[in-house]
Image (spheres, rainbow, N blue to C red):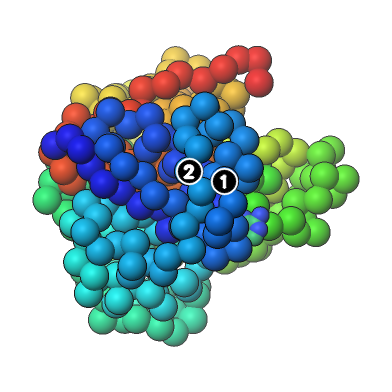
């Protein structure tokens, strides 16, 4: 499928900028419009200077419904809650596909959603969205017309958890993660101000980060255990891009001798998954930054009772725009790697 006409609603933000960078270089995309309420009329390259060689277009001030009409794909890269507010009229405009990067439609269980986000403003629409964890869902996304792209922490966490699902249930795995400041978006905040962040580390959303909702949703579905637990523990780190996550799990005594098979499961679970790279040693964050790859290392203790898994991703690519485009590719039946094979730069 070539000659795609796509739109990025919320193109002025960090996730929107990353979508534009990738879509403007995607070989099947013929036309890419970006909208912004705050930057309407401004050249895209004034807000995203690195895009200057790719486009001289300006941000459109069209409403999401206006821009969606006649489009093949509409990406929504808006702050939380905005997608719910405008989804109905976008559906009515009838684009071929909607890919939402916000959390609004990621959690089909309204009870779980409510626990972390409060009452859902558009509960009737949630069931229309497929969850776009591309490296797990793969070809099952084929034909999807509404996709909820996973959160950045949630992507790293689920890629660490997924292979464990077929083993005897580990005791509540702990997922310790640290993110760069771009995870908080383009609007300056006290916690992203350079002096507060540059040489600093701090925990936040203690015992209840919102991405835990989608992590629990998936973990419970994969294990078939509605009471299965997992804990996401998040930190802000002194770098701009990337998420580094470490899973630690204690295995039940009964699987004490199966440490090697637990590690082998990571290989078999991701066989053929182009964007998951299993490494022989823990990844380094900078080797994932700038790419759509998830770098994963899994190790078990000698007695087989403990598992430690490290994951490195770029929060704005694998954790946002890159994965959203990978899901679009899969939904359209394109090779999933189309437009996404760039490798990173190092040192960075
Ligand atoms: N950042 C990440 O790592 C990440 C990862 C995965 C998913 N997401 C999700 O993606 C969505 C967008 O996140 P984001 O990080 O891109 O947030 P963001 O940078 O704050 O952008 C969100 C919106 O804020 C407005 N905005 C951005 N820059 C602005 C500026 N300089 N001046 C005025 N308004 C500006 C834009 O809308 P208008 O111009 O129309 O006002 C933009 O669509 C969120 O739902 C988020 O949860 C983010």
Horizontally, residue 195 falls left or right of residue 51, namely: right
Residue 57 against residue 125 in the figure, above or below: above
The picture quadrant where one finds residue 41 is bottom right
Q: Which residue is mark 2?
A: 57
Q: CA distance from mark 1 to mark 2?
A: 6 Å
Residue named by callout 1: 43
Which residue is at a point 29% across and 77% down the rendered structure image? 88
> Residue at the spot x=60%, y=24% of the render?
286
Neighbor class of circle 1 (other Cα within 10 Å; few <14, some 14-19, many 20+) is: some
Q: Are marks 1 and 2 in contact (CB under 8 Å)?
A: yes
For ligand 1, give the image quadrant. bottom right
Which quarter of the image is occupied by the C terminus?
top right
Residue 283 location, x and y as percent?
A: 53, 23
Q: Is residue 196 above or below residue 125?
A: above
Whether the residue carrying mark 1 lies under 8 Å from ligand 1 is answered with no
Asked whether, in this view, residue 1 is left or right of residue 172, the answer is left
Image spot of residue 73 (x, y percent): 26, 52
Frontmost residue, 201 versus 307: 201
Residue depicted at 38% across the width and 75% down the height: 86
Vertical position of residue 43 compared to residue 239: above or below: below
């Amino acid at each position: 499928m070539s000659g795609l006409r796509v739109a990025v609603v919320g193109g002025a933000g960090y996730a929107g900028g990353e979508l534009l960078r990738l879509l403007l270089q995607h070989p099947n995309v013929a036309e890419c419009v970006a909208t912004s309420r705050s930057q309407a009329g401004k050249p895209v390259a004034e807000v995203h200077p690195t895009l200057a060689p790719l486009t001289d277009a300006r941000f459109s001030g069209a409403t999401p419904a206006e821009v969606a009409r006649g489009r093949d794909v509409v990406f929504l890269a808006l702050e939380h809650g905005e997608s719910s507010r405008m989804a109905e009229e976008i559906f009515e405009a009838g684009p071929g596909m909607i890919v939402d990067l916000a959390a609004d439609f990621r959690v089909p269980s309204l009870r779980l959603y409510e626990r972390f986000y409060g009452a859902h403003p558009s509960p009737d629409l949630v069931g229309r969205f497929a969850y776009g964890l591309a490296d797990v869902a793969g070809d099952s996304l084929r034909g999807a017309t509404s996709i909820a792209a996973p959160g950045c922490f949630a992507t790293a966490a689920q890629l660490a958890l997924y292979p464990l699902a077929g083993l005897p249930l580990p005791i509540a795995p702990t997922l310790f993660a640290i993110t760069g400041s771009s995870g908080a978006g383009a609007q300056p905040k006290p916690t992203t101000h350079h002096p507060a962040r540059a040489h600093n580390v701090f925990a936040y959303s203690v015992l209840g980060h919102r991405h835990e909702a989608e992590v629990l949703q998936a973990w419970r579905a994969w294990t078939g255990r509605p009471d299965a637990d997992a804990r996401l523990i998040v930190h802000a780190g002194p770098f701009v891009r990337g998420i580094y996550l470490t899973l630690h799990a204690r295995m039940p005594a009964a699987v004490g001798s199966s440490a090697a098979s637990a590690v082998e499961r990571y290989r078999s679970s991701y066989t053929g998954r182009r964007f998951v790279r299993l490494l022989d040693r823990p990844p380094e964050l900078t080797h994932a930054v700038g790419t759509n790859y998830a770098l994963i290392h899994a190790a078990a203790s000698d007695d087989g009772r403990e598992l430690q898994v490290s994951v490195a991703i770029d929060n704005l690519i694998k954790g946002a725009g890159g994965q959203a485009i990978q899901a679009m590719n899969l939904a359209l039946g394109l090779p999933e790697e189309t437009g996404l094979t760039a490798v990173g730069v190092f040192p960075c």
